[in-house]
Amino acid sequence: MSYLGTSSGPTTATAATGKELLNDVTVNNPPEDSVSDLSFSPTQDMLAVASWDKKVRIYDIDPYSGNNQGKAMFEHEAPVFSAQWSIDGTRVISGGADKQVKLFDLASQQAQQIGVHDAPVSSVRYVECGPTNAQVVVSGSWDKTLKYWDMRAPQPVSTITLPERVYSMDTTQKLLVAGCADRHICIVDLNNPQQLFKTYPSPLKWQTRIIKCFPQADGFAIGSLEGRCAIQYIDEAKQKELGFVFKCQRKVTNPPGTLGSRTNSNSESDIYAVNAVQFHPIYGTFSTAGSDGTFSFWDKDAHQKLKSFPNVNGTISCTGFNRNGSIFAYAVSYDWSQGHMGNRPDYPITIKLHPVKDEEIKQKKKK
């Protein structure tokens, strides 16, 4: 495995100057507690936001000005951990600590429970399964299962038992990947959704925080507590050739050669959790963000950091690109990385919309 910026020479990232975030737009009427998930509609410029305040809020976003307003809201009986859109953009699905899976219809403004687990639901996704592309909702839970719901029956159409609790899950096309407790990574081929395709331990040493599938569905990224991200391919030969691990959410506290550094050539770092990874829908480049309060854009194929952004004065709990990648949303809110002691009453809770420039996110031409 190699590290970003070491296998192919140093990176040429554009350094943060402090001006990059001046045009970011604040979302009006944000949640009243930590933001746990956010996702843009695949068909229109609308943003769904899940929060610890037990609510899912849906915002209308003007893609040109960033002007925004609340469109709808529905509630769970406990903190909501996941909120995602249906494939056609007409409905939002959600899951949370009340163990419920809910579906909200935008047209009727009605929410209904479509599923339930034996423990909190950490992740929900809308998927197409099998050769007929049957549309179902899949939910991952701390009860160590994945369950598929067809939205018309109270019982799941199928259940997969996993080795541990689901902490994060993502899908693209026919690929589903779940990151579980004790570093288990579980892969499902949605052409055969009723069984596990492959399981193996995470290449990262600490707890998985986020799983995100590549747009091409040939692999996925894993972010963990240790401030590192792994780029993983499904095909073993491809993984051997192209897979790697890199450091991201780190803050150098002892530059090389300074008094107190371990050696004259090594620097020391404060290490922060990687809370969010998102792939750009057009260019396939991606972002990382986390407890250090920064986000960066990367090119995995060139092993290159494209752009660093300045600290946003609070942990970044989740992020998302809109359907054409022109907006990057990031939530600044407490991520519980320092336990309940770190959750001060004055901790910021805000969602920002960053207008994405091509020079920040597009692959750089090889010299």
Image: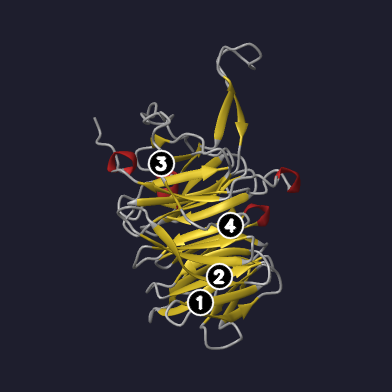
Q: Is residue 306 left or right of residue 260?
A: left
- Asked which quadrant contains residue 218, the reply is bottom left
- Nearer-N-terminus badge (1/4): 4
Mark seen at residue 104:
1
Mark 4 secondary-structure assignment: strand
Task: Give the Cα distance between marks 1 and 2.
Answer: 8 Å
* Horizontal and vertical percent position of residue 359: 29, 39
Mark seen at residue 297:
3
- The answer to whether the residues at label 3 and label 4 have Cβ atoms under 8 Å apart is no
- Nearer-N-terminus badge (3/4): 4
- Nearer-N-terminus badge (4/2): 4
Which residue type carries mark 1?
Phe
| Residue on which disc 2 sits | 94
Task: Give the Cα distance between marks 1 and 3.
Answer: 32 Å
Mark 3 secondary-structure assignment: strand
Residue 90 vertical placement versus 302 (above, below): below
Q: Residue at x 75, y 44 (%)?
A: 341
Which residue type carries mark 2?
Ser
Residue 205 vertical placement versus 9 (above, below): below
- What crowding class fits label 4: few (fewer than 14 Cα within 10 Å), some (14-19), or many (20 or more)? many
| Residue on which disc 4 sits | 36
Asked if residue 178 can be seen in this view, the reply is no
- The answer to whether the residues at label 1 and label 2 have Cβ atoms under 8 Å apart is yes
Task: Give the Cα distance between marks 4 and 2.
Answer: 11 Å
Mark seen at residue 119:
none
Q: Is residue 211 left or right of residue 166?
A: left
Q: Is residue 121 left or right of residue 312?
A: right
Which residue type carries mark 4?
Ser
